[in-house]
Amino acid sequence: MSGLEYPGVLYSNSPHAPSKRPVLQTPLIKENWEGGQLETRGKYGSLEKINSLLPRSKVGRSSPDLMNMDSEVELKNESISRSLFQKLQEEYEFDDKWLPLVDYLCTFGLKESHFTYIYERHMACFQISQASAEERLDFLLNAGVKSKDMKRILVRQPQILEYTLSNLKSHVDFLVGIGVPSTRIGQVISSAPSMFSYSVEQSLKPTVRYLIEEVGIEESDVGKVVQLSPQILVQKIDSAWKSRSLFLSKELSAPKGSIVKMVTKHPQLLHYSIEDGILPRINFLRSIGMRNSDILKVLTSLTQVLSLSLEGNLKPKYLYLVNDLKNNVQALTKYPMYLSLSLNQRIRPRHRFLVSLKKAPKGPFPLSSFVPTDERFCQRWAGTSLEKYHTFRQSLLLTGFAEKSGRKTLVSRR
């Protein structure tokens, strides 16, 4: 995620963000870590709601055959982790007491570079016992976090090893309380693990209240918004949103209901820069002949248009629409989804395939042919096998790649 304001630092390396240097800001109130007392229970439910997520006993989990397989894997991992630990001791003077923890974390794929990064960033987490770390990470795994995502979580938020189990439980309970389905809890945690460092009562709940009371998002839609953009829970939302909302209202005569729909579908809009993100894309749509009412219709239906690159995405698709598909700009108001589809992976291959089969209709090419799945497209439009279409598309992609590589080679020789 770029062009967004995170608590503590303003990231501005995106074409959609204001051109500012990173500015340190006062972080939101943080949770206590190991040994701390939390006061995070509230209207979102009690801790008992998610007791089923607590780590289960490992006794009786495996059959004898599986236990033998586990033993072989553990011996191999132990050999790897011991060798790694010796390197870490030589370079960073790792304490012998840290070996069990390092040995355990190696099972998630952490390598020497990850441990050195964590050590330099937050050495204190190595003071945690292996048993405590396993208890906490087992809880996250049971909550839905995928094992393959644990490495990224630990590197991004090593403090997670220090958070008390009651802290982790209260935050998961909070997510359940705002309407995030249990099947998506793991994804939200993986995308925004720093959430655990913010107080439920003093940071996360006030953020949700702001979304409901100030932005206008329906309480029933908050869970959906968080699923679409988990980072919204830990990003700074301030009065700048009011200026963005006022801009859309004045620039496009957008009613509040339309603006709320845009945010609900694409929460990142809360942080887009007016000058570098929103206005240039509105001006582009105007330049190709859209009226304000058309632009509002497109943005309400497909708000992520405001996140697409002008030169690398919107302009090439518009030129292909006019020059190759023989359509006019009004077709975009009927099928704004066209702008969200890949030009190289879907639009061009399907168009060229129907042309090659002599099944492309005369006149404007129907944009509705780009909407269905490949299988439905082959059945309804091409009348041929899926395999034949995929072979054609692959050949077209390879040809395009070869042509692009050839142009680069000519340029480099000059």
Image: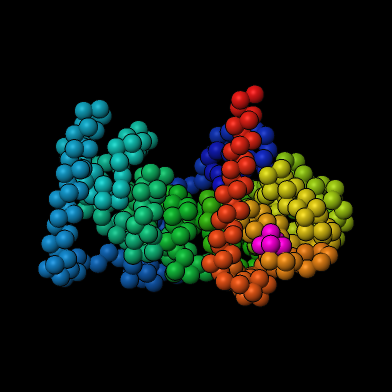
Q: Is residue 320 left or right of residue 207?
A: right
Please say whether residue 28 is visible from this viewpoint: yes
Total label count?
0
Q: Is residue 393 left or right of residue 282?
A: left
| 92 w.r.t. 40: above or below | above
Image coordinates for residue 232, horizontal then vertical, percent:
56, 53
Q: Is residue 353 shown in magenta?
A: yes
In magenta, the rendered stretch is 351-356
- The residue at the far top in this view is 414
What residue is drawn where x is 41% and y is 58%?
Answer: 39
Q: Is residue 279 left or right of residue 388?
A: right
Q: Quadrant of the C terminus?
A: top right
**Residue 350 sits in which quadrant?**
bottom right
User: Depth check: 323 or 164 in front?
Assistant: 323
| 64 w.r.t. 156: above or below | below
Q: Is residue 128 left or right of residue 278?
A: left
User: Depth check: 411 or 126 in front?
Assistant: 411
What residue is drawn where x is 75% and y is 47%?
Answer: 315
What residue is drawn where x is 57% and y is 54%?
Answer: 395
Image coordinates for residue 109, horizontal then vertical, percent:
30, 48
| 85 w.r.t. 264: above or below | above
Image coordinates for residue 106, horizontal then vertical, percent:
26, 47
Please say whether residue 32 is visible from this viewpoint: no
What residue is drawn where x is 38% and y is 44%?
Answer: 155
Magenta span dominant secondary structure? helix
| 381 w.r.t. 216: above or below | below
Q: Is residue 6 shown in magenta?
A: no
User: Depth check: 179 or 86 in front?
Assistant: 86
